[in-house]
Amino acid sequence: MEAMKIDLLIHSASQVCVVPGHDGPQRGGRLGDLGIIENGAVAVADGRILETGPSADLRARYTAETTIDAHGRCLTPGFVDPHTHLPWAGDRAHEFEMRLGGATYMEIMAAGGGIMSTVYQTRAASLEQLVVQNLPRLARMLAHGTTSAEAKTGYGLEKAAELKQLDAIWQLNQRQPIELAATFLPAHAVPEEWSGRTDDYVQHIITELLPAGADWMRRRQTTLFCDVFCEAGVFDVAQTRRIFTRAAELGCRLKVHADEFEGLGGTKLAVELGAVSADHLVKTPDADIAALGQGNTVAVGLPGTPFGLGHSEYTPAKAILAAGGALALATDLNPGTTWCESMQMVMALACRYMGLTQAQALAAATLNSAHAIGRGDEIGSLEPGKQADILILDVADYRQLGYRYGTNLVKMVIKQGSVVSKQ
Ligand code: NIG
Ligand code: FE
């Protein structure tokens, strides 16, 4: 039989970690099924996975335009980072110094620093400056294995600046290989102009900002998530519900920042409203954990955030899994609490502080995180038909992920069948 001609064949991998999804995220006790093929290969055509299988078998049946010998290295799906605060302008290294001196994150925020200081820097930047400042951040993410990510507004907090952030996300999507899912977050903080008038700002979000975001979504013919920072001293559950109800009417899908510092019930609300994900989840009440086990909302743990803040409490991953919940991981990449571009670092933290095994961390950072941005059918695993977003690690065993940290274990990044990063 003549060999079939394809675009790309990667062969002689020690392990091909398929991370099978079947019909959804890996929930509860199923988390960590990597579907490993030893001495494996991946066949790619038209930017998609055609087949995975034993190397000898695929080499006999396919000839490829491009052939890559993995030389006994491990292959995984590209990492999906479902929660970042890209794009922003500037940095807050001086606030980190203040925190080292004893000030808390919420104290700095209440004193007009924190999110507001990045808001001023982001408002002052032109669209092009915003794009140019964020391209190197995305390049570092890519080099560390992230092939798809979410990106949020929330450093504009007024119509023009929120739309400028959406336009920056749009341009960043065109100008580098990582695919970005856009999220609208005008409810990230109450801006100084509305200080003491949270309900009025919520009304402004509902009547002015959300329709402007929805209009942007229609003009761009894309999808848009809506997120709210549901937290004590920011937006309460009733305000979050009002914003989400309007956002859903306007065609947005929902995500929430909940339980980062206090458990208010934002996670339960997210499940009730069918949100795609509920993120942070450190102080999550038991009833909200139980709700995650019943609904389809993916719980996103962001262990870089408590680590970045020097806190000792992390997402209760074991309880969420025991309840049957779907758990994903993300960086929360932002200039205030956690400037970390690496999903490998996040996996290392999740193994130590959330009690995950390396296999659970890898499935949470690929298949389940793809579901946390509503793209589990397209990305996140090496199953036939999915986009060929593939990492060749510089190690033979996936268990080096999470175990080793602080250096980059990714050798090559392939996005939709093309090599986009090599180290
Ligand atoms: O997810 N919690 C709110 N937002 C960010 C921090 C943003 C900032 O401090 O600039 C977070 O940790
Ligand atoms: Fe966040």
Image (cartoon, rainbow, N blue to C red):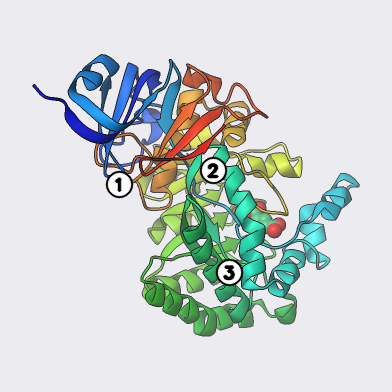
On screen, residue 128 versus residue 92, left or right, reads left
- The residue that mark 2 highlights is 142
From the image, state whether disc 3 or disc 1 is nearer to you.
Answer: 3
User: Residue visible at 27% across and 44% down?
Assistant: 46
Quadrant in which the C terminus is drawn: top right
Q: Is residue 139 left or right of residue 51?
A: right
Residue 361 badge = none
Q: Disc 3 marks which residue? A: 165
Question: Which quarter of the frame holds ligand 2?
Answer: bottom right
Marks 2 and 1: which is nearer the front? 2
Query: Seen from this angle, which residue lies furthest right?
Result: 101
Secondary structure beneath label 1: loop
Instruction: Tell me the CA gap for discs 3 and 1.
Output: 27 Å
Element on which disc 2 rests = helix
Horizontal and vertical percent for residue 379? 36, 44
Q: What is the secondary structure assignment of the residue under circle 3?
A: helix
Which disc is residue 377 wearing? 1
Name the residue located 45 percent from the left edge and 19 percent from the top edge: 73
Horizontal and vertical percent for residue 49?
28, 37
Q: Earlier in the sequence, mark 3 or mark 2?
A: 2
- The structure residue drawn at horizontal position 42% and vertical position 37%, both measured from the top left corner, is 323
Using the numbered discs, state the Cα–Cα distance from disc 3 to disc 2 in whole angstroms. Answer: 21 Å
Label 1 crowd (10 A; few <14 / some 14-19 / many >=20): some
Q: Looking at the image, is 344 positioned above or below residue 58?
A: below
Mark 3 / mark 1, whichever is N-terminal: 3
